[in-house]
Amino acid sequence: MATFHLELVSPERLLFEGQVESVQLPASEGDMTILPGHSPVITTLKPGILTVSGGTGGAQRLFVRGGFADVNAAGLTILAEQAIPVAELDSARLDAEITAAEQALAGASGADAQIEAGERLSRLQDLRRASLQ
Amino acid sequence: MPSLKDLRNRIASVKATQKITKAMQMVAAAKLRRAQMQAEAARPFAERMSRVLGNLAGGLTAGPDTPRLLSGTGADRTHLLIVCTGERGLCGAFNTNIARLARDHANRLIAEGKTVKIICVGKKGYDVLRRTFGERIIDFVELRSVRQLGFEHAEGIARNVLARFDAGEFDVATLFYARFRSVIAQIPTAQQLIPAQIEATGSASGGGSEAIYDYEPGEAEILATLLPRNIAVQIFRALLENNASFYGAQMSAMDSATRNAGEMIKKQTLTYNRTRQAQITKELIEIISGAEAV
């Protein structure tokens, strides 16, 4: 199967670089899957699960806390604010994220910010429920 | 002429100091390696970030709705200086160099009749700048208790800066830190943060710049979230570079201190031995002349 180049970077380090077959990302306007030859797009990410398949290590699932994805002819670059492999993600960590989101919602001023913080919170809560099952 | 006991004490104390500086040098070397690795690990993100930003800004035409973080406020009356220095001393001229660069910059701006505000990151720079710019320092961030610099520290500073920018407290922000070249060379650097300076992306950026992008959600929204993030990334990078520079400076300062102590010990030991010999000779003469007199 055709592959393309993926770079996954967080502010602290380069997390992954290599050829992969497909990447599913939690884009802010709905999840999307990037396959080789995707048209150039830049999108923001919301908190969610990123699935990388066809890499050297098989399928990988990572939790990202938001960030950006840039697809161009050279490949896909994901600038994640924070990325944690799902295996290392535990409920305590998610709870901390949820608390932070709740605080952000309480402190948000203006309708737009409130909607944004609310969406973030509900998404994290969904993730929490999903991870418990 | 100091007595033999004085000399002995002096040598012992210099030896103790040498042990301390030697230990500090070794600790700094170990920490430097870690700081350097951390700074290198953070580089890809900053590079990709500026590439994406370059791609975005390249396709954007300046208009009234361009984000102010990119185009500026249209004025440059009030300048904000963010001065990053070390938290500790004993590192040669490291802190002084950064503070001097910032001070010269501030003095130039003041001479031009502009308003200068300063945010200090790191205690040492604050101590130096407080004397000259006491009332101009609007904030002071201390990272002394921080063991490992994380992105959240940079984010905190960035939030602070952005809140002030949104409140219209300043027009231009400049970041001061020491760029890490090598263990013996740390270059104090001034970098303009707001309005953002976008490096032009050529064809070398991976062939992505000439592509026509889709934007989700919209171009403006992405830019609006990307620009504040970029500030945090730049600050983070500055903090890491600064950290590596600090340990580099400390290492070379402690290295020369150890060497100086070694030289001093050599010199003192020589004086000590000479004095001791002189004393023995004197005692011998006394004994001999005493015996002759009998």
Image (cartoon, rainbow, N blue to C red):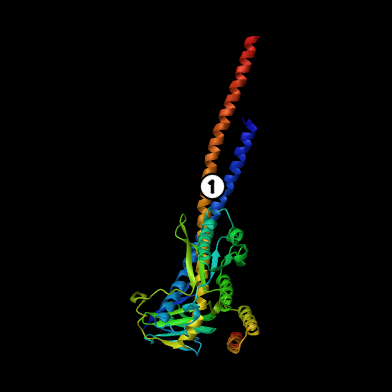
Residue B50 at x, y percent in the picture: 44, 75
Give the quadrant of residue B265: top right
Question: Which chain contains the residue that carries disc 1?
Answer: B
Question: Is B8 drawn above or below residue B76 in the view shown?
Answer: above
Give the quadrant of residue B133: bottom right
Question: Is residue B142 something one can see in this rendering?
Answer: no
Residue B238 at x, y percent in the picture: 51, 66
- B71 lies left or right of B128: left
Question: Is B17 drawn above or below residue B186 in the view shown?
Answer: above
The C terminus of chain B, quarter of image: top right
Q: Which element type, helix, strand or loop, lies under badge 1?
A: helix
- B102 lies left or right of B47: right
The N terminus of chain B, quarter of image: top right
Residue that numbered label 1 is attached to:
B257
Residue, x 52% and y 51% (percent of image)? B253
Residue closest to the eye, B132 or B48: B132
Q: Residues within 10 Å of mark 1 (few under 14, many from 20)?
A: many
Question: Is B268 drawn above or below residue B173 in the view shown?
Answer: above
Residue closest to the eye, B196 or A87: B196
- A74 lies left or right of B278: left
Residue A122 at x, y percent in the picture: 60, 88
Count of all numbered marks drawn on residues in the image: 1
Residue closest to the eye, A110 or A118: A110
Q: Amino acid at mark 1?
A: Ala
Residue B278 at x, y percent in the picture: 58, 24
Farthest top residue in view? B294
